Amino acid sequence: MIIELPLLILLVVTAGGAIMVKDLISAVFILGSYSFVLALVWALVGAVDVAFVEAVVGAGLATVFFLLTLFGTTEKDTHIRRSPVPWSALLGLPVLGLLLLYGAGDLPAFGDVASAASTYISPEYLENSVEQTRTPNVVTAVLMDYRSFDTFIETIVIFTAGIACALILRKGGS
Amino acid sequence: MIRPHDSAIVRTLGHIVIPITQLFGIYVLVFGQHGPGGGFVGGVIIAASMILAILIFGIDSPDSVLARKILHGDGLGLLIFAGVGGLCLIGGGQFLNYSYLQIPSLDEASQHYVGILLTQIGVAVDVAVTGVSIAVSLSFDEDEISNDEVTNV
């Protein structure tokens, strides 16, 4: 509890800062620090694999891609001109937030053994993954063995993204 | 195209940091079954080391020859992943059911272990190639941009 509150405040501050700041390059770096704080939160709640991905992809690779994109643009559009906030957003977003808070009251407590997510098939994975696959990291066993077809489609998605970027952005040659 | 960096500090640090990053990426990839990590994260770290080489030394430098070579490997990782699935098909089972990998002198659980390792290598290769490919695609040709500006004005 003593460490969760500062992390939450940092998360909100960095997320707001990335949106509010005028200079786009500063926004990219603030977004990187947001990803780093989020990785700490994931590690705190025990999702180490997700924390690893968040730190490497969010704070590392995405920052480089954003910066490369910004360096490819001209000086003019590195500063944002912001139109005033429409009244529908001022009215609608608090209502949406209240609805989400109302819905969050029904969520099971963190680590609840009797919740729907941890009663159906996860106990089977947790109990059998070591003797079925000799893989102590259950996350890897689920991703690569029990749910390997999903991972296969994800790999196709990544491959398609690379091909599409090359087709759209590379002009002629190489 | 990205021009090579002319600072001696950056170039010297690059020569030290890039091999360590690559080694760490391979460690994360291979260690993914016993700790946090796995194919995706390992591939991203390896891609990050190659992007670092491109940013510091430029794409045409001999120091970033690996990044140039890997650009020809588009789809290789997907081929490894699908190849493991195809081997399971040939072994008489379902697609990506590692129990049918038919590796002699290995029990079923160890076959699953080998299958997970091979598919992880496939994911890592795919992610690494895609990361470097997107970074190269995003590094625009500067002459091209100046030409566009002239036509716009």
Image (cartoon, coloured by chain):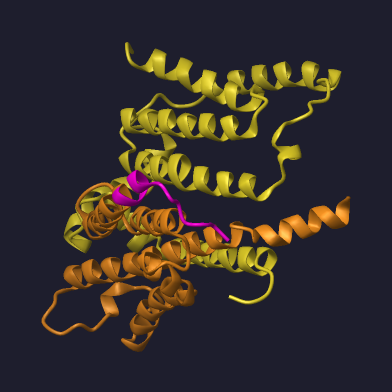
Chain colours: A yellow, B orange
**Residue at figure coordinates x 26%, y 48% from the top left:** A126
Residue extent of the magenta highlight: B1-12
Quarter of the figure with residue A113? top left
Question: In the rendering, at what x and y percent does residue A161 appear?
Answer: 58, 62
Q: Seen in the image, is A16 located left or right of residue A33?
A: right
Q: Based on the picture, tell me whether residue B10 belongs to the magenta stretch.
A: yes
Quarter of the figure with residue B66? bottom left
Quarter of the figure with residue B64? bottom left
Q: Seen in the image, is B116 located left or right of residue B107?
A: right
**Along the line of sight, the residue nearer the viewer: B140 or B133:** B140
Position above or below: A158 against A13: below
**Along the line of sight, the residue nearer the viewer: B82 or B77:** B77
**Along the line of sight, the residue nearer the viewer: A111 or B82:** B82
Question: In the rendering, at what x and y percent does residue B144 appear?
Answer: 72, 62
Question: In the rendering, at what x and y percent does residue A137 appear?
Answer: 24, 50
**Along the line of sight, the residue nearer the viewer: A147 or A121:** A147
Q: In which quarter of the image is the N terminus of chain A?
A: top left
Q: In which quarter of the image is the C terminus of chain A?
A: bottom right
Question: In the rendering, at what x and y percent does residue B65 appear?
Answer: 39, 70
Q: Does residue B93 appear anywhere in the picture?
A: no
**Residue at figure coordinates x 59%, y 31% from the top left:** A27
Q: Seen in the image, is B98 located left or right of residue A99?
A: left
Position above or below: A79 against A133: above
Q: Residue furthest left?
A: B105
**Residue at figure coordinates x 81%, y 20% from the top left:** A85
**Residue at figure coordinates x 53%, y 18% from the top left:** A13
Q: Does residue B145 appear anywhere in the picture?
A: yes
Q: Based on the picture, tell me whether residue B70 belongs to the magenta stretch.
A: no
